[in-house]
Image (spheres, rainbow, N blue to C red):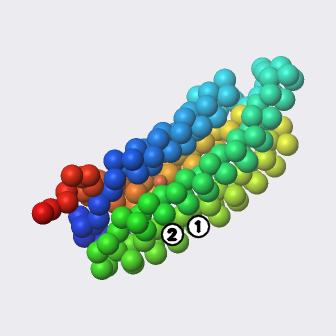
Amino acid sequence: MPQPDLNFSTLSPADRLQIEREHQRLAQFLHDLHDTCCKFQTLEDCQGCGREKVACCQGRLASFRFDFFDLVAEHIENEEQIMRNSLGDAGCDEYLRRHQEEHAQVLREMKEWMQEMSALSRDGHTAAAIRKLHQKITARFGEHAQTFDNPFFNSAQNETSGSVSG
Ligand SMILES: [Fe+2]
Ligand SMILES: [Fe+2]
């Protein structure tokens, strides 16, 4: 996607920190999902795990589905608000509009994958469901960061509090 000149945008250190923390929190959630499954690195399913462990993984996947979705939705709202406040330059409206469309698309895709993976888990393939969901979200978020988030956060100038002239 052709990038507008985002160098005119300014970002306060507090806003930058907030977004960085939210991105880290999302990454931590994904990391915890990965660690839930002791078969993550293998192509085996849940054979070998006891009933209690499988039930625990099913519960973790079910709560991840809702907690993570809410967290992403909240992050998107914050990120868009911060960008709206920071982008002052003409041409950035188009960037923001496309970024918002992309966020809506990410949420739709995530909802679909989460439904699919819940069904897979209910059918007894919880390890496969966790692995697939983790891989899909990790890849999609990586792509989104590279195409949309990073160009903005890397080019936005730090707002300085002592910049009042006179
Ligand atoms: Fe983001
Ligand atoms: Fe984003």
Q: Quadrant of residue 49?
A: top right
Q: Quadrant of residue 45?
A: top right
Disc 2 element: helix
Indicate the position of residue 75 as horizontal and vertical percent values: 55, 53
10 Å crowding of disc 2: few (<14), some (14-19), many (20+): some
Indicate the position of residue 69 as horizontal and vertical percent values: 66, 51
Instruction: State whether residue 143 appears in this view.
Output: no
Indicate the position of residue 166 as horizontal and vertical percent values: 12, 63
Disc 1 element: helix
Residue located 23% across and 64% down the image: 7
10 Å crowding of disc 1: few (<14), some (14-19), many (20+): some
23 left or right, relative to 116:
left
- What is the spatial separation of the Cα atoms under label 1 and label 2, in whole angstroms? 6 Å
What numbered label is drawn on residue 19?
A: none
Residue located beneath label 2 in the image: 100
Viewer-closest of 152 and 10: 10
51 left or right, relative to 37:
right
Viewer-closest of 11 and 115: 11
What numbered label is drawn on residue 104?
A: 1
Viewer-closest of 155 and 48: 155
Indicate the position of residue 94 as horizontal and vertical percent values: 39, 78
Kind of residue at badge 2: Gln
User: Looking at the image, do the residues carrying marks 1 and 2 touch, with CB atoms under 8 Å apart?
Assistant: yes
